[in-house]
Image: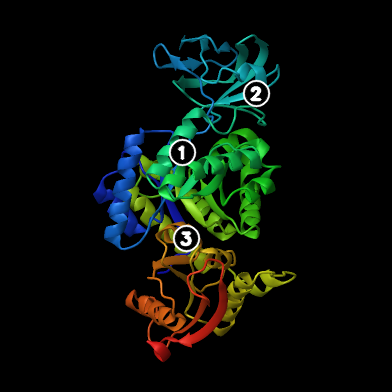
Amino acid sequence: MHRATKIVATIGPASSSPDILSRMIAAGLDVVRLNFSHGTADDHRQRAEFVREAARQAGREVAIMADLQGPKIRVGKFENGRVTLVPGAPFVLDAACELGNDERVGLDYKDLPRDLKAGDILLLNDGLIVLSVQRVIGGEIHTSVKVGGELSNNKGINRQGGGLSAPALTAKDMEDIRTAMALGADLVAVSFPKNATDMEMARQLANIAGAPYGHKPKMIAKIERAEAIPALQEILDASDGIMVARGDLAVEVGNAAVPALQKRMIRMAREANKTVITATQMMESMIQNPVPTRAEVSDVANAVLDGTDAVMLSAETAAGRHPVETIETMAAICVEAEKSEHVELDKDFLDRTFTRIDQSIAMGALFTAFHLGAKAIIALTESGATALWMSRHWLHVPIYALTPRVASERMMALYRNVVPLHLESSLDRDTALQQALEVLVKNGYAVRGDMVVLTVGEPMGQAGGTNTLKIVKVGDIV
């Protein structure tokens, strides 16, 4: 069964073996996330090698996304590893403290006191603990515990409403970008960007680090700061896609605001011809349990109905007990949700103008395939741009994007409703079209008599040159 929505899964201790990776790919994994908040550079290199080998054995390309840690502001360590905070009790966040206790704890971000004032609310450990700032004295933040509980080493700190000044790229991130380029990451996810400048800087660093390998990754902005919301359009313009990172975002703006923001971000990304990933706690209960809750099923389905390109798994596959079963379950939910999607393709084209020939051909292919009831759309593409434009509009016709470039294949693994396939380059259009149809028939995507819509560019082999649309029946050529 064709599944349009892609699945991103984080690789960790529970899923790093070649066998588990192979089973995850067979279950429907499209993009692997390497979380640079955990593990060493050698860990990530080895996992990337395992992913490439498992994908090669599966006969398809799987993209690798390097997710940078960013300026995660955290408490320091405690003498006994953890403390229990009592509501109403005083507690000090002290930039000079080495080992914490019941009364105070250190900070990994020493400039935090400069960002705060009396009356600010701090949320620790993803909002489970709430502190109210009473006063700031030098490097000490004196607070009162509003919501208590257990606080352990290195838990995160957010300020309600955002406004912390920590830069999006740390020294660790810069080193991790070099590691990511050396292992051939196709995508780089930038944590906590506040504006377009953060994304432009990350792209420049990635392009410089990737230059020795002839590699330019796509840049994904993780929207998880309150300040990023009013700057969303400029961040989109500076990125290749965004991630709706609901964890830290919910802590800063409040849980209740996130569902509407998710819908808005997905809509804006699609209108801007950018990709979008919906992430955080999608199948959280499957870390322990073999089946998800009904609320989680609805959450995944609603992200699909919102139009997300991909849904993402974090701890569920990195550290959970059922990484393969989680992907299988998520894939099944996506397929069921997609069946109910209403196509409004004609409405999508109203009041739109296309100034580029290749984009006009892409839109023409969608319109033709929809109204003729074609079995498939075949896009012969170098860069993948034609497939991306097509994927921004939903219709129940799969798009098969054939390219000679492995990098383009991997990039298109994230595009909704696009199946990337490899096709050796040919300078003769008719030969290339014949080979493309043969690839579809060989893989069982089409049979004799099926009507398909093809797009191709002449002269062949040039990115951005799609200028031809052709309608054929498979039996007419193959």
Which image quadrant is residue 438 in?
Answer: bottom left
Name the amino acid type tagged 3.
Met
Q: Nearer the viewer, mark 1 or mark 2?
A: 1
Q: CA distance from mark 1 to mark 2?
A: 33 Å
The answer to whether the residue labelled 3 contacts the one labelled 2, judged by CB atoms less than 8 Å apart, is: no
Percent x, y for residue 207?
A: 51, 45
Q: Which residue is mark 2?
A: 121
Q: Is residue 47 above or below residue 140?
A: below
- Residue at horizontal 49%, vertical 10%? 102
Q: Which residue is mark 1?
A: 177
Name the amino acid type tagged 1.
Ile
Residue closest to the far right: 351
Number of residues whose C-alpha sits closer than 10 Å to that of mark 1, classed few (under 14), some (14–19) or many (20 or more): many
Percent x, y for residue 62?
A: 38, 56
Q: Which residue is mark 3?
A: 412
Percent x, y for residue 59?
A: 31, 63
Name the amino acid type tagged 2.
Ile
Q: CA distance from mark 1 to mark 3?
A: 21 Å
